[in-house]
Image (tube, rainbow, N blue to C red):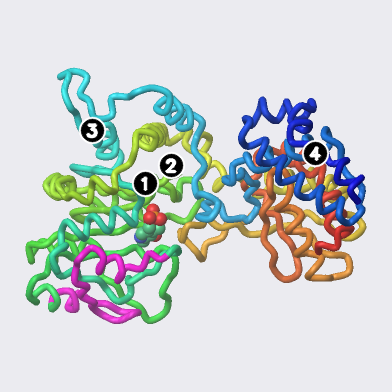
Amino acid sequence: MNESFRAIPSVDAVLRSPAGQAAVERFGHEQTTAGIRQLLGNERTAARQGSPLRDAEAIATLAFAELEAASASSLRPVFNLTGTVLHTNLGRALLAETVIEAAVAAMRAPVALEYDLEAGKRGERDDHLRALICELTGAEGATVVNNNAAAVLLTLNTLAGHGGGAIVSRGELVEIGGAFRMPDIMAQAGARLIEVGTTNRTHEKDYRTALEGEGVSLVLKVHTSNYRIQGFTSAVPATVLAKLAGAAGVPLVNDLGSGTLVDLARWDIRREPTVREAVAEGADLVTFSGDKLLGGPQAGFIVGRRHLIAAINRNPMKRALRVDKLRMAALEATLKLYRDPDRLAERLPTLRLLTRSRDEIAALARRLQPAMVAALAPAYRVSAADCASQIGSGTLPLDTLISAGLAISATNGSGAALERLAAALRRLPVPVIGRIADGTLVLDLRCLEDEAGFITNLGSLADELGRRQDDGLV
Ligand SMILES: *Cc1c(COP(=O)(O)O)cnc(C)c1O
């Protein structure tokens, strides 16, 4: 026993080994030493049990591998084969190349973020985007905050923050994923919710009566983006609401959610109301997201009447919700792509993925099927099949886009085997995320653009599946 304890190398010996030196070079002395000490603890356990021991070089190599794994970002790039293009849990919109370059340039150097280069004095952060947003939406004024939830919060707090009444239809009291519930946001903003109408029907007279009450500060219209009420329904159009609110002397706020700047019908996607339309309908303020259909970084836009935007900018909360130079740069570059709508579908990844044809995706599925069969046969059956993609982020939830992908099932029909495969795919160097439904794992290929990278990535799939089975970790 003593004999084997003496065979355990010292920390210094491990550090001096070639792999130890390489680890110090890469990760520094402190982390490497801590890693080695931990592994030497395992060696003492092995010695106690009479198991074979590692030499200094082997321990250093192991330490190197563990430090490398620990230093990898936990924000791992993944293949999004879920079929949901704007997947909130996978970070929503991908940015266009020019947008990435603009953000990188803003990271590298000081920028004139709040500095007026002509006058040589302090400028305004919003100046960079205001004109561009107004040009694209037809609004008089604009500002940008952290996300659309912040845009709604800030708008309500500015206009109705001291218990002012905010009139909303009961059919529009939405919950957006991730704990954004309209009544809760109202309460946090300090506004008093005045519900009108019923879940399925709200009429002009409901608003009219509410507007006659005391202390009304605004009328809020919420785009019911993530659900639809069908059947015996009735809602009051924004144009009518604008007239009612205007006559009562209070602003109409329209929370569009996934505001789009272009008419999607142009690309055969069911149309969502555009921001320009919402402004033209007479809303005094319109709020929408930066990273949904707009296809930019996370942000929330507030556009509309100049004096209301000025009031929002005077709210101290604005300072807490503002965006940094990286996102300003990325937003500016994203918005500029909209000046050339003819090439938007080529340049803006969100639109490029949404408009990809089924035939193109199906051809990709046929090309990838053999590689997948090679990795998975005979335990799994793989076929190229049609499937349905979604836009995501609560946009047009009932409208699916016809797509294609790989449909995989376990040859023995076992659900556990399918889960095992899904887990192995998630352990690949670039994790592959699909979706399981009705005993089939579907890899929707709509969002796969790096075909070669995907095939290389499959290289360790058979191993991943086999290893876990051998380890009994299944
Ligand atoms: C998505 C959405 C929000 C929240 O926007 P984020 O940018 O995710 O904060 C608010 N309102 C509506 C109607 C939405 O669809």
Q: Which residue matches tag 1? A: 299
Tag 1's secondary structure?
A: loop
Q: Is 9 located above or below residue 313 in the figure?
A: above
User: Toward which corner of the image does residue 468 lie, by quadrant?
Assistant: bottom right
* Residue 342 falls inside the magenta stretch: no
What is the magenta range? Answer: 179-208
In the rendered image, which residue does mark 2 sit on? 296
Rendering quadrant holding ligand 1: bottom left
**Which quarter of the rendered picture does the C terminus lie within?**
bottom right
User: Distance between the Cα atoms at labels 1 and 4?
Assistant: 47 Å
Disc marking residue 59: 4
Between the residue at mark 1 and the residue at mark 3, the CA separation in whole angstroms equals 16 Å
- In three-dimensional space, the C-alpha distance between marks 3 and 2, rounded to whole angstroms, equals 18 Å
- Which mark's residue is nearer the viewer, 2 or 4? 4
Crowding at dot 3, Cα within 10 Å, few <14 / some 14-19 / many 20+, comes out as some
Residue at horizontal 41%, vertical 74%?
A: 229
Between residue 191 and residue 371, name the one nearer to us: 191
